[in-house]
Image (cartoon, helix red, strand yellow):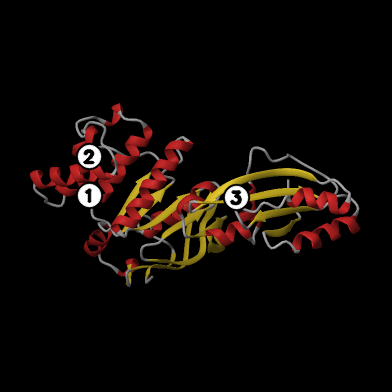
Amino acid sequence: MSELIKVTDLSKTFETKAGAVEALDGVSFTIDKGEIFGIIGLSGAGKSTLVRCLNLLERPDRGEVIIDGENLLELSERQLREKRRKIGMIFQSFNLLMQDSVLDNVCFPMEIVGVRRSEAKKKALEYLKVVGLENKADAYPSQLSGGQKQRVAIARVLASNPEILLCDEATSALDPETTKSILKLIKDINAQYDITVVLITHEMAVIQEICNRCVVLEDGKLVEENSVEELFRHPKTNAARRLIFNSSNQVKSMSGGKVVRIAFEETNTTEPVIGNLILEFKTPVNILESNITSISGTSRGQMMVQLPDDEAIANKMIEYLKGKTSIVLEEVSDYE
């Protein structure tokens, strides 16, 4: 893959009544052409500011945004407008024209650049078929579900023939089942049209579903960058661990005994790892949390286990688990 987007030392500070807020602080990364790239972080991490800087809706105080070899900050207003036509964007709030039909919503970006109405309608119907809404052409946004509205928004972006699709929390307002269907649609569009996708979210499950690589933001800083698979197996920062460990089933607090995270490498492993561990050392362990997640369509399991208070036995258990080739083991010092 060839490099399409290069972000270097991006920084942005906002002045507020409470003082200066550093939304971005020296963020750098690259995105390859045709990639589905994730930007993840909790609320206030700087995600929305970063995505707005990628198309210069927000001008950074420092740094560079280079797309296809051109530094956006060096372009004239006319050149920047031309460049933005190749950068589509979809939002959590859909941003549809409520007084216009579905067909007119999709026609809109084509008509404002001079495409004839007849040609725009023809293309709009093609894009509505791509997103599975060809039978809703005459409907209005108020008559659609949230998932259908987002599909219209995606069809409208396709009508601009973009090279890059920025998705800013595009599935946050949707239920889990609809989220999966929208993510599958985005993945299909990425494959069919070779559109580079940048996915901004606070949900690890969204990143794991379709992204190839991702960066983790915290307090405006890029704290981790890796493949999604490797991030899940070996999170290196507390910010990444919080995103991966986040679960409603997680205990609120615990004391005593070491805690380890076990990530299962093979989806078809039949060895009862925890059962054998207990039998080997004749000592029980406490399973604090376990789940199975999907990473790019492949199931991966993880488990948080509290080991016995006896440090000698706990250390032997850790060495025993490290000898298992079907798992990745990580000691967790700040599990809460």
Name the residue beneath numbered marker 3: 243
- Identify the residue at horizontal 11%, vertical 51% (top origin): 114
- The tag earlier along the polypeptide, 1 or 2, is 2
| Label annotation for residue 105 | 2
Residue at the extreme top of the image, as rendered = 143
Q: Give the image location of residue 237, x and y in percent.
A: 64, 59
Place of residue 128 in the rendered image (x, y in percent of width and height, measured from the top left): 24, 41
Residue at (75% x, 54% y) in the render = 260
**Which three-letter amino acid code belongs to the residue tagged 1?**
Ala
Query: Of label 2 and label 3, which has the lower sequence position?
Result: 2
First along the sequence among labels 1 and 3? 1
Label 2: which secondary element = helix
- Seen from the viewer's position, the closer of residues 232 and 120 is 232
Numbered disc 3: secondary structure = helix
In terms of depth relative to the viewer, which is nearer, 136 or 223? 136
* Residue 199 picture location, percent across and down: 43, 53
Marker disc for residue 159: 1
Name the residue at the front extreme. 270
Above or below: residue 139 compared with residue 165: above
Residue at point 83% right, 57% down?
317
State whether residue 52 is above or below residue 175. Answer: below
Instruction: Give the amino acid at mark 2.
Output: Asn
Amino acid type at circle 3 is Leu
Q: Are marks 1 and 3 in contact (CB under 8 Å)?
A: no
Q: Give me the C-alpha separation between circle 1 and circle 3.
A: 35 Å
Q: Which quadrant does the N terminus fall into?
A: bottom left
Indicate the secondary structure of the residue bearing disc 1.
Answer: loop
Query: Gap in Å between the C-alphas at discs 1 and 2?
Result: 10 Å
Mark 3, Cα crowd under 10 Å, few <14 / some 14-19 / many 20+, is: some
